[in-house]
Image (spheres, helix red, strand yellow):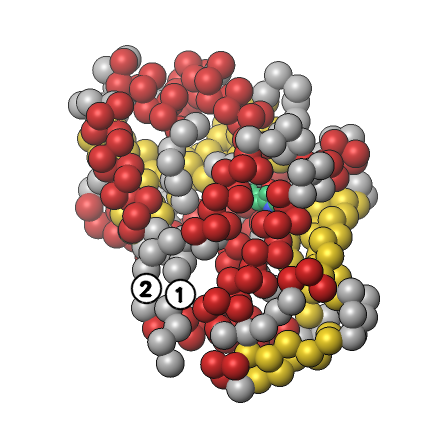
Amino acid sequence: NTVTLSLNGSNHNHTAVNQFHEDVLRGLTSTPKRLDSKYFYDAIGDQLFQDLMNCAEYYPTNCELDIFKNQTAALAKSIIGNDQDDFDLIELGAGDAMKSSYLLKYLLDEGIKFTYLPIDISAHVIEELDTNLAKTLPGLNFRGLNGEYFEMLQKAATLSNKRKVVLFLGSNIGNMPVAEAEAFCHELRNSLSPGDMALIGFDLKKNPKTILAAYNDGDGITKKFNLNLLSRINKELGADFKVEQFDHYPTYDPETGACKSYLISLADQKVHLADYNESIHFQKDEYIYMEISQKFTTEQIKSMAANTGFQTVKYLFDAKNWFTDAIWRVQ
Ligand code: AVI
């Protein structure tokens, strides 16, 4: 079969297709059914996420941008070593580095010595950054790393023995269930050395209506963003989902801070994955669990740091106190 899979718009290979197929099949044959939100980001999903970040209800991007734009000096001060050592500034899932560019520019203007090492699963993202940052931030020491986070962190450790500061922005950590997020921080801790730092963006608990609205925007972009994964499965795995037979159901639970989205089957229906000769049955009103976007309290963030071997250095908050960038040091 000639199916190709685009992970974040690039990386065409059959191992990735097999992984996608395996994950989709495992999820849709589970009870309850689920799909993995990491697969939202094909070329169309990337565009829909861009649209989401520009829509009025989706606040996290603007909140974190507020911190990076308006508290750049405080941010820089917390990550620069006392002796102003030359360090490696690593960004996990750098994307277009829109927010981090403010920090990069500040460090450059202050004459601080550092190398920027963005890590991204998309080769295209790294190439674009290489071209764009050379123009917008001349003089920046840049080394792009294309691949999985932890493999590339290991690679970064072999490239230099300089102190490492790792950025993981955008509340991407919220797209993992809490236990998985802790395991992630633990693994991050184990890929670093004493004195290294992490700067992690967490979306905070706030008025439940504000949160729910961000995942239920009036223009229906979040709905399209979720449904697009069904279209992607159609394209890449030869399935025949009728996307109009599914509805988007976003939820937020203020007790747990879990913001979850589901797709609900509007009919009793069968979906066939022609390329693999497999059929999946959906009952009317049956749901597919699509995504978690966990919201945190500062107490939870503090205990996550303590549980995973980090010491809290500082929290920076946006003007509305809706989002925080936590700065942690490896003990
Ligand atoms: C990428 N991630 C942090 C977004 C979030 O808020 O969980 C993805 C998203 N899902 C729906 N809207 C945005």
Residue 262 seen anywhere in this rendered image of the structure: yes
Residue sitting at x 79%, y 45%: 253
Q: Is 13 situated left or right of 320 in this image?
A: left
10 Å neighbourhood of mark 1: few (<14), some, or many (≥20)? many
Ligand 1 within 8 Å, label 1 CB: no
Residue carrying label 1? 5
Q: 330 or 222: nearer the eye? A: 222
Residue carrying label 2? 12
Circles 1 and 2: CB distance less than 8 Å? yes
For residue 265, which quarter of the picture? bottom right
Residue sitting at x 42%, y 75%: 18
Say if 38 sits above or below 327 in the image. Answer: below
Residue sitting at x 67%, y 31%: 57
Which SS class for mark 1?
loop
Quadrant that contains the C terminus: top left
10 Å neighbourhood of mark 2: few (<14), some, or many (≥20)? few
Ligand 1 image position (quadrant): top right
Residue 15 seen anywhere in this rendered image of the structure: no
Q: 160 or 144: nearer the eye? A: 144
Q: Amino acid at mark 1?
A: Leu
Q: Amino acid at mark 2?
A: His
For residue 128, which quarter of the picture? top left
Residue 312 screen position, x and y as percent: 53, 32
Q: 240 or 67: nearer the eye? A: 240
Say if 14 sits above or below 223 in the image. Answer: below
Which SS class for mark 2?
loop
